[in-house]
Amino acid sequence: MLAERSRGGHTGGRVEGKVAFITGAARGQGRSHAVRLAEEGADIIAVDICGPVSSHTDIPPATPDDLAETADLVKGLNRRIITAEADVRDYAAVKAIVDSGVEQLGRLDIVVANAGIANAGIGNGGQTLDKTREDDWGDMIDVHLSGVWKSVKAAVPHLLSGGRGGSIILTSSVGGLKPYPHTGHYIAAKHGVIGLMRTFAVELGQHSIRVNAVCPTNVNTPLFMNEGTMKLFRPDLENPGPDDLAVAALHARPPGRMGRAGRHQQCRVVPGIRRSAVHHRASPHRRCGKHAQVATPGGLTSAGFLMVSAISSIDHGGESW
């Protein structure tokens, strides 16, 4: 069901007056992105499946109540929000939501393709690639790769018709930059997201549309902080807990420092992000330019982000995108 929340007064921010479409917005990273962008003045189109993707997973899925809580948090910031329950694998459903949201809110400027599923808590997620079941492979690729493509595909016509440029941010992973064992279907999907980012960037740069990918390491959300994932990262322990993941987090960081130092965000299940990698890339103050960068996090104790950019060079007018 599509629902609009009321809007009141609001002081200006970095994305004041813009509209962001966010998938996987019911909780975790998606909720954090929605709240952070709303804090900076954006109205939100928030989508989440609010239910299980596979019958194999042991991780409780997001719920309609979770999505309603995201809406209440955005509404509390005096921003408009439109919520809808949909599966990103269903292009027709996603397109209908984006079309309706743009009709109600008047424009679209930012796309955050964030929806995802756990790599360890679904089916035989701890198996090697040769032992991975076909349905587990299909679910992972369909959500993490095809779902990202379909979400952006549904949004691009509105970015183009607006003629103001825009920003597209895809959620990849540190697993989109380097391999890890026993999560091959996830690794393949997240590497694919980097390919989507690079291709969308060269195709859309001429329209002043920037395309980036954020590559989280270990983030404190329900999809990561659960028994299955903790055992996957610490198989040496019988009952690993959150504190036991600190050692695994060190191994998640790619070797060396690539590019310039970036900011990291503490992504909590409740809002309170001081500086969001997504918000930073969504800001119109980030102009299009010809460069590629990977920003490494300053630390991984709470949550780390790597950020990959592939932005086409363009001398654009209009709004400061």
Image (spheres, rainbow, N blue to C red):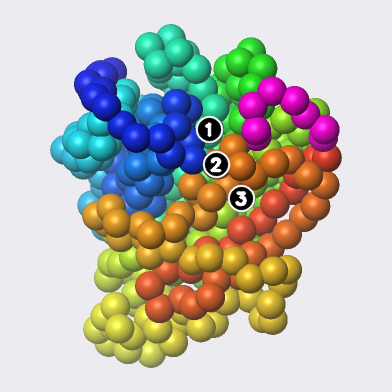
Say whether residue 75 is visible.
Answer: yes
Q: Is residue 122 magenta?
A: no
Mark 2 or 3, nearer chain start: 3
The spot of residue 158 in percent (x, y) is: 58, 17
Distance (Cα) linking label 2 and label 3: 11 Å
- Quarter of image, res 81: top left
**Nearest to the observer: residue 71 or residue 14:** 14
The amino acid type found where label 2 is placed reads Ala
The image shows residue 124, relative to residue 156, as above or below, that is below
Region rendered in magenta: 314-321
- Quarter of image, res 58: bottom left
Quick check: marks 1 and 2 in contact, CB under 8 Å? Answer: yes
Q: Which image quadrant: the N terminus?
A: top left
Q: Main secondary structure of the magenta part?
A: loop
The spot of residue 198 in percent (x, y) is: 74, 45
| Residue 264 relative to residue 295: left or right | left
Quick check: marks 1 and 3 in contact, CB under 8 Å? Answer: no
| Residue 71 relative to residue 140: left or right | left
Q: Which mark is residue 110?
A: 1
Say whether residue 53 is visible.
Answer: no
User: Which residue is pictured at 50% across the width and 17% down the height?
Assistant: 107
- Quarter of image, res 307: bottom right
Q: Is disc 1 placed on a helix, strand or loop? A: strand
* Foreground label between 1 and 3: 1
**Residue corresponding to mark 3:** 213
Q: Which mark is residue 282?
A: 2
In the picture as drawn, the residue positioned furthest to the bottom comes out as 236
Mark 1 or 2, nearer chain start: 1
Quick check: marks 2 and 3 in contact, CB under 8 Å? Answer: no
| Residue 212 relative to residue 227: left or right | right
Q: Is disc 2 placed on a helix, strand or loop? A: helix
